[in-house]
Amino acid sequence: MTSPRLNWDVLREIARCADRATCTSLILTCRFFYHEAAKTILFEPVLLPNEDHVSKFLRFVQADNNSRYTYVRDVSFDFYELPPQLLDSLVRSMAHMTRLERMYLGMGERFLNIFPVLADAIARLTSLRRLAINYAGDLTCAFLNSLQSGLVSVTLTWIWRFEHEIDPHLLNNQHPAFLLARCASTLEELIYKNWLTSSEVPVFNHSYPKLRTLEMYCDDEFPLVVSYIRAFPNLRRLRVETLHSESDSEVVQASVTERLTRHRERNISSQLDPHGPGTWKHLEEFCGSVVDLYVLGLASRISSVTFLDDLGGAHHLDFLSAVLSYAQPFHLEIHGRSRLLARPTLNLTTILRQSGAARLESLDIAIRLLEKDGTLDIISHLHALASSLSQLPSLRRLRLIVTSAMYPRTLTLPPLAPVEVMLESFDVDAFVRTLGEATPSLRDAIVEVVGPRGKDRRRQGVIAKTNVEVARTDMFPG
């Protein structure tokens, strides 16, 4: 056999960078690629949606004297029936996939019910690091309690309204602090979807010291934050989306607001209780609804805050002022309708002059104008906003976008509304130049006006100075 013109390292790199179809062809060319291209194929996610795919996968992985088992890294199970012989072969094969790190179960409860022997084989693995289960329920709870792997990431999407079907007193047993206790020392990321917790604070004696990321997408509108602070004391990134995130009402009934405020006060007092766990010391990021952050009542500073909901209701601005008084972020991202600037009493312009905004170094604001804003004096509100921005002592980065979303529902376009005329004649460059002169710390700014009557009509004003360093995340190393 003659030596190849390309050395083995180069050939190995070719196999590593090739796509799956190319690797399939390379396998047929020589003994070297028979090994190396197979590695690349199995390093990629393996999707098993039906019997045919399972059969082909097993034939492939059992080839080459069963040496390919250890190449498998990521498997998704999404099938619901297998012939007994094929199932037995898959169960036996699982024991040899000693480097399998990631797994997804598409319909968890159904899968675990139909294939308990396969579930047992998966539970005996010690190599799994990332697990995602859709359609989780009672069987999922038992499965998680049997796992032998030290998981670092778990994603659970519960059966819709699953929690309403069980005894409320048992809800605490499905709280993540209890459910994932076997991997308390290793877990770093937890994502919970369709979740509802108990109205009582669960009591447990262990914590998850390495958990840094928590995402909760839940039916529960009133979570008790103290249980999560106690379980995850070193949390850095928090994302919460409850049914509040879907609210788009400009007016909230007084009774609802009172309930939100009472729950917020309960959460705050539980953090300030001298016998409680305190609050999160190193929270770097929050992402979610302003109402959710208000209800959580976090009494800690948060380096970066991103609000996903469209702010515009009066209650949103009241809640925004309250949450910033505690969070005091370095970075804030916010978007909403004209009321964000135009509310007579409390608006973004006045909120930015409060102590909760004093540490801001980076700010993203998006304002959307609707048809009902036809006579709004938007230019005056923008200049008032600029005045507040100039009072921020550390502001170094700004993104401000104003979009005219006024699209008349007529066959022929009517004349521009007064607010559209104002936007069309607005001197963006002069506005940015004046803002930059009034705000010496501002080194990186983009102010953009979109419209009127079309996203293709864009004008920008830019400040771009050198050495821009804006603290947003990773404020606490380690």
Image (tube, rainbow, N blue to C red):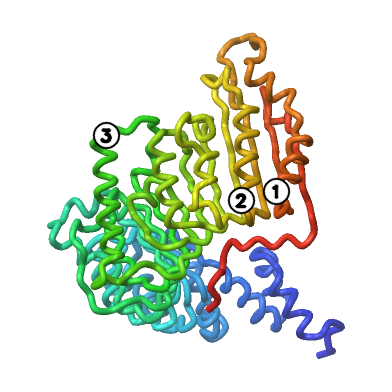
Residue occupied by mark 2: 392
In-image side of 423 versus 464 (left or right): left
Q: Are marks 3 and 2 in contact (CB under 8 Å)?
A: no
Residue occupied by mark 1: 439
Neighbourhood count class around disc 3 (C-alpha, 10 Å): few under 14, some 14–19, many 20 upward: few
Residue 429 position, x and y percent, is: 78, 36
User: What's the mark number on residue 254?
Assistant: 3
Residue 125 position, x and y percent, is: 38, 81
Which residue is nearer to you in this view: 433 or 122? 433
Q: Are marks 2 and 1 in contact (CB under 8 Å)?
A: yes
Residue 250 vertical placement versus 65 (above, below)? above
Q: Given the image, on which type of amino acid does mark 2 rest?
A: Leu
Which is nearer the N-term, disc 3 or disc 2? 3
Q: Check disc 1 and report its element: helix, strand or loop.
A: loop
Q: Given the image, on which type of amino acid does mark 3 rest?
A: Ala
Residue 380 position, x and y percent, is: 63, 28
Which residue is nearer to you in this view: 201 or 266? 266
Neighbourhood count class around disc 1 (C-alpha, 10 Å): few under 14, some 14–19, many 20 upward: many
In-image side of 227 versus 476 (left or right): left
Residue 139 position, x and y percent, is: 24, 65
Residue located at (81% from left, 90% from top): 1
Q: Check disc 3 and report its element: helix, strand or loop.
A: helix
User: What's the mark number on residue 380?
Assistant: none
